[in-house]
Amino acid sequence: MNVTFITHSNKFYGANRSLFNLIEGLQTYDVNLQVIAPYIFSPDANSMSNHLKEIGVPVYNIPLSWWVSPSTNGHFLKKRRDAFYHLLSNFRHLPKLIKVVRAWQTDIIYTNSSVLPMGAWASYFTGLPHVWHLRELNDLHYEAYFDWGKWIMLTLISQAAVNIYISETVQSYYQRSGRAKQYVIYNGVASIGQFDSLRQQALHTLADKKVYTFAIIGVIHPSKGQEEAIRAMALLVRRYPNTRLLIVGAGDTDFLKGLISELSLDEKVELWGHIDEPYKAFFAADAILMCSRHEAMGRVTVEAMAASRPVIGYADGGTVELIEDGKNGLLYRGGPEELAHKMCYLVGNSEKGRQMGAYGWTLAREKYSIERYAEEVYEVLSSLMSPPVSRTNY
């Protein structure tokens, strides 16, 4: 089975880390893999391409343009200009993509994100089955809108051979009647062996700390809720002054710095920026915050479970599919006041928090291993194996 994966970015963040885990798992099966990724415009030792090359997976860099824009705000003509630029750029590079697909003797084309249409186009011109792995809630989470409207995007998605969704929440966002077979497959975040190793590391870092520590981990973005976490922290320290908050992730922190100073939290909140090894942050914390209002699944939530940390999550989106309230974490609704209330509970009940972390680890090891992830995807890919019929010569 020869599978060509198409990814939307060369940054080694959430969607690409999940793809990398999948590829790691599929390497134990009879599958030959190659990945097509955008060009790297600036050197980055931690790029997706470099990670793939380290495990022997061939990577081809082709210019790929997203067919989403950051916002509907702005000048109408500029938005139309950008939409046509994305369209023409993709059509310009489509022949090269098709050439690589055919040269590899590809059996299945596999697109790793909704923000790229080129996998669907290459599928049309080659007659090869197309798998669309849908991972994001674009307009809800990132205020990113499809150039030609969501309706056209949904129509194209519905014509794939298979749609894979990372949660039931994502399925309900994208699903539309069509020929595509539908599967919900949750991401795997660690192998069984890695889960066992993480548990041993967790046991060495679970002793009571002098300062009870929360962490919120993810790209700095309004949708991720860093502001809410800071405001909740301002309420928490009134009752529990011996606490702190770690904010971990890449992005512009100027606003957050101003808010921290305004709320006199300079000694209570630390901005770590991006770190290559996220478990360093998990093990530095006693509990993790997931404040996103529209999380597609929540890889950070599962990684926190793998690190035996309880999670306080906003009761929305994919988060409610991962957190069993009171068992592996706590769910909250409302704003900073409700979040602070849940944080107070964990600070005052540290043993209960450790019990939640242990249960979360057991649950994650069973449901979110790379082995389980790869096996489910492999079964989907195997179901598509039949001699493809080319419908059009490009």
Image (cartoon, rainbow, N blue to C red):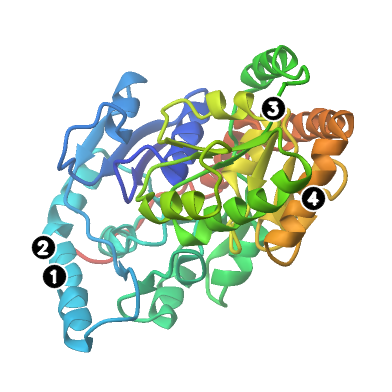
Q: What residue is shown at x 36% (from left), y 44% (from top)?
A: 5
- Front: mark 4 or 2: 4
- Front: mark 3 or 1: 3
Q: Amino acid at mark 2?
A: Arg
**In the rendering, at what x and y percent does residue 338 appear?**
76, 60
* Badge 4 vs badge 3, beta-carbon distance below 8 Å: no
Q: Is residue 63 above or below residue 74?
A: above
Q: Secondary structure at mark 3?
A: loop
The image quadrant that residue 146 belongs to is: bottom left
Q: Earlier in the sequence, mark 2 or mark 3?
A: 2
* Badge 1 vs badge 2, beta-carbon distance below 8 Å: yes
Q: Give the distance between the C-alpha atoms of the residues marked 4 and 2, in whole angstroms.
A: 52 Å
The dot on residue 335 is none
Q: Is residue 64 left or right of residue 24?
A: left
Q: Earlier in the sequence, mark 4 or mark 3?
A: 3
**In the rendering, at what x and y percent does residue 264 appear?**
55, 48
Q: Earlier in the sequence, mark 4 or mark 1?
A: 1
Count neighbours of disc 1 (C-alpha within 10 A) and say few if under 14, some if 14 to 19, many if 20 or more.
few
Give the residue at mark 4.
342
Give the residue at mark 1.
88
- Front: mark 2 or 3: 3
Q: What residue is shown at x 78% (from left), y 31% (from top)?
A: 357
